[in-house]
Amino acid sequence: MIFTSTAIWFFFILGIAAVSGYFSEKAGIVNIAIEGVMVAGATGYTVSGYVFTEKMNLGNWAQVFSVIIAIAIGILGMLLHSFVTMKLRGNQVISGTAINLLMAGFATLLTAAKMGGESGTIKSGYTGVNLSHNTDNVFGRLSVWLIIAMLVIIGLWFLSQKTRWGIRMKAVGENPHAVSSLGVSVQKVRLQSLIISGALAGFAGALFSINTANDFYGSVNGYGFIALALLIFGQWNLILTVLASIFFGVMVSFASNATSLSTAFQDVPSSVWMMLPYILSLLVLVITSKNSHVPKSLGKPYYKTN
Amino acid sequence: MNLKLRLNTWTTSSTTKAKFGMLKQSVLAVLFGLVIGGIVLLWKGVNPFAFYSEMIAYPFENVLKIRSFLKAFVIFCTSALAIAIAFKSGMFNIGVAGQMLFAQVIVTLVAAGHNIHWFPLLLVAIIAGAAVGAISGVLKAFFNVHEVVSTILLNWIILYMAKSIFTVKSGLVDSSTGTTKAFTESSQMIVKGSDGSYIEWIIPFAILAFVLLGFVLVYRYTKFGFALKSVGINPGTSKLSGINTKLYQILGITLSGGVAGILGAIMLLTGQSFSVPETPPAEGFQGIAVALIAFTNFAAIIPAALTWTIINNGSDGIQSMTYAQELNGGTVELLNGLIIYSIAISIVFLRFKPIAWIQYYIFTRKSDKYTSMLAKYRKASNQIKNDIKALKSKKTESKNQFASHKEETSEIRAQLKKLDKDFRHKTISLRKDKEAMKIARLAYIKEMHEIQAQMKLIDKKHAAQSIKKTINELKDKLAITKKDFQIQVAGIQSDYYKGTNRDFRVQYNAEQTELRMKYEERYGELAINYLNNKDSDSKTKFREEIIQIKAQTNQAHAKLKESYLNKKQSLKGGKE
């Protein structure tokens, strides 16, 4: 069975994170900071979860607030990025790297405080909210949050492809001066898309910590970087990016379960299977990247000219 | 050549200025990061001064610690060098971790259990690392695969490859220790000390010094090094100047991979054996930070790596010793992140000139112009402020009135309602008689207007609103006056700099840029003509013209510089 719940979760976490990257890179801002912002979101979710369940006894429904907190923290984290990239017009890669380290440091520092579990992990104390109690069916075990994530992806597809704002956002990444000449504020559009990006990255972080159930140890396992790779893999096209996330989720799920699927697979060490998704991604990139369309002013700071 | 003039030229050159600006930026960024980190430490209940002083003292406590400090320093330096080389050619090499891991895998396969000297192993490591780097370069140049993605993917591929090679099943790994067979003594990069202990840092240090010096010389004095740099600075211009940009980009990341291979060899061969890590080794990523602090300048990597090693080594030591309860590895990561974020915002620190600010402040406050301006401004603004105050009291008055009249107005409203009701009652009976209805309606409207007029008289809300509007207008006026004043004060600033070196320099820089822009524009035109023209005669013509323009520009530039230096000299003479 390829569509295990691992694959589905993997797809949604990576998909949301990749769409987060889409919104910032389409507007022309390189976003390596997704990983760090995801860590920040996951930290916000787990720490607030610990406070709500252990200290305030609010019960399981408080996870709605925790997700909102994760999103808010994600937006704040991305505002740090926007301060460097838009206000100071600094190096976008450096800023992203800094935010990654900063957030990882904060998260790891917080895990020392012995929240819930042993030292080194934080326990949110929430249990999953599933569609039905029928645990035999994979789709019955589907979390409500995943449905919301799916709706979010569809909504964002509509926002970016079918609305005036979406066209502006994409145009800002291609030729900001042309957009500016039509009386649209470039910085405003970029800030808006960075805020969306931050909210999504925070949400992806929250999804990550919902999936790992309880133990958060200050890292999201490099999912942010993989999401970035998927965005490039999807050639900065929203639908292709989402498809790439599905492909990658299925591949990783297959790889991590390969040895238990068939006896024929058991002779090969599991690390070879784990290597497979990465090699396939690289191969697909080699084949498809020749025609990929990079946003033209990606990574270039915008100076308004009179 | 006159030494004084030479020194003068050096200090006034824009490159020197830029370099010192960068130095200032990185020093202030590190300090800023440490200050913010100190605030976080305070929040955690740790005295930051004690923490930092212990952090600096820790690596130098005894000989063993100094040795491990030096080894860590060499590792950070090499990693930063690898990343800086890629940066110089415009490539962001996140794959140092994978490249060094690949080098380690190959070296282990070659050396484990065999008696081979470390030097050929080092060469093997360089080739292995460079090969991985070259893969990313080729993918970027010919397949348009972004190097950030390909290196990230390669990191994981190499990690899992290493895991699948070094298994207990294959017999390469000892099942009890989880490591490979030990290297022989000649394979290891160690020197025996006089007391019989092994010193790990000397050979890596020598290798690093040799490599670093080599790269500095190559990038500074050779055509090859210049091409590597120019590809990173401006690929378009490089291409027009006849540099094979794709080739040099590949070479850049290949060299970077080679240095990553050296890093792998150093880390592997100072130890006894190899064990596969769980994630791509962190040493490959930490170089990014050091290279950024150094602004990818090779010479600056040394102090940057020194700072970095003190922060990492020192605070690593502290959490294992004194404050173990509150802190963990996150502290170091946090400090690192804060410092890099400060580097990202370091352009702010370039504008940080406290001495100049104070000088300027004193100058403006002393000048007569300023005092008269200030008096004028104060008078004008005070007047407006008084007006606003008066209007505000009026506004509150009318508001109070409105509140007291509320009862009256509600009465009138009741009247109005009653009138309405009466009129409706009346009209029900008069429905058929149109004439009577008309009269009744007119009477009703008249009465209603009367009541409404009465109400308007009482209703002072409108008055309050109009007062508010004027207040806002006055506030705007106040802001404009303030802005005018600030502009006037800024006028003093140009007085302040008139006839000083800075004034001359600003002029000089402006003229210089203008000259360069002109030259570049003309050069671009000619270069395009040159490339488009297939006729060899006109080609030589264009080339001659280009050379001519170059010479002219150089001449004009020399003249400009001379006049600037003369002006500067005269300034000095006047002072004496």
Image (cartoon, rainbow, N blue to C red):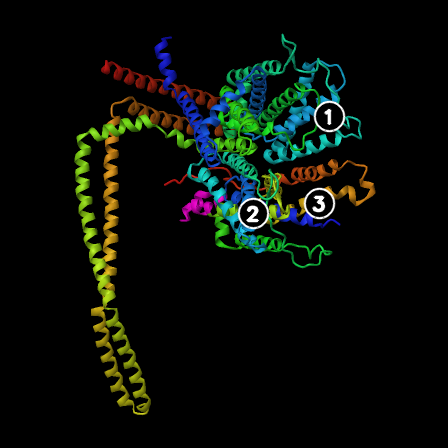
Mark 2 crowdedness (10 Å alpha carbons): few <14, some 14-19, many ≥20? many
Q: Is residue B241 above or below residue A48?
A: above
Residue B179 badge: 1
Residue B150 badge: none
- State the SS at label 1: loop
1 and 3 marks in contact (CB < 8 Å):
no
In the figure, residue B561 lies in which quadrant?
A: top left
Q: Position of residue B500 (x, y in %)?
A: 27, 22
Q: Is residue B404 left or right of residue B431?
A: left
The residue under label 2 is A50
The residue lying toward the viewer, choosing from B244 and B10, is: B10
Task: Let me know if marks 1 and 3 both belong to one chain.
Answer: no
- Kind of residue at badge 3: Ser
Residue numbers of the magenta segment: A172-191
The residue lying toward the viewer, choosing from B361 and B55, is: B55
- Name the residue at 42% across, 21% down: B550
- Report the magenta stretch's main SS: helix
Residue B297 visible to an observer of this rendering? no
Q: Position of residue B402 (x, y in %)?
A: 24, 65
Residue A253 badge: 3
Gap between marks 3 and 2 measured at Cα: 30 Å
Q: Earlier in the sequence, mark 3 or mark 2?
A: 2
In the figure, residue A113 lies in which quadrant?
A: top right
- State the SS at label 3: helix
Q: Nearer the viewer, mark 2 or mark 1?
A: 2
Which chain does the residue under circle 3 lie in? A
- Kind of residue at badge 2: Tyr
- Name the residue at 64% across, 54% down: A143
- Name the residue at 51% across, 17% down: B220
Which chain does the residue under circle 1 lie in? B
Q: Is residue B89 above or below residue B398?
A: above
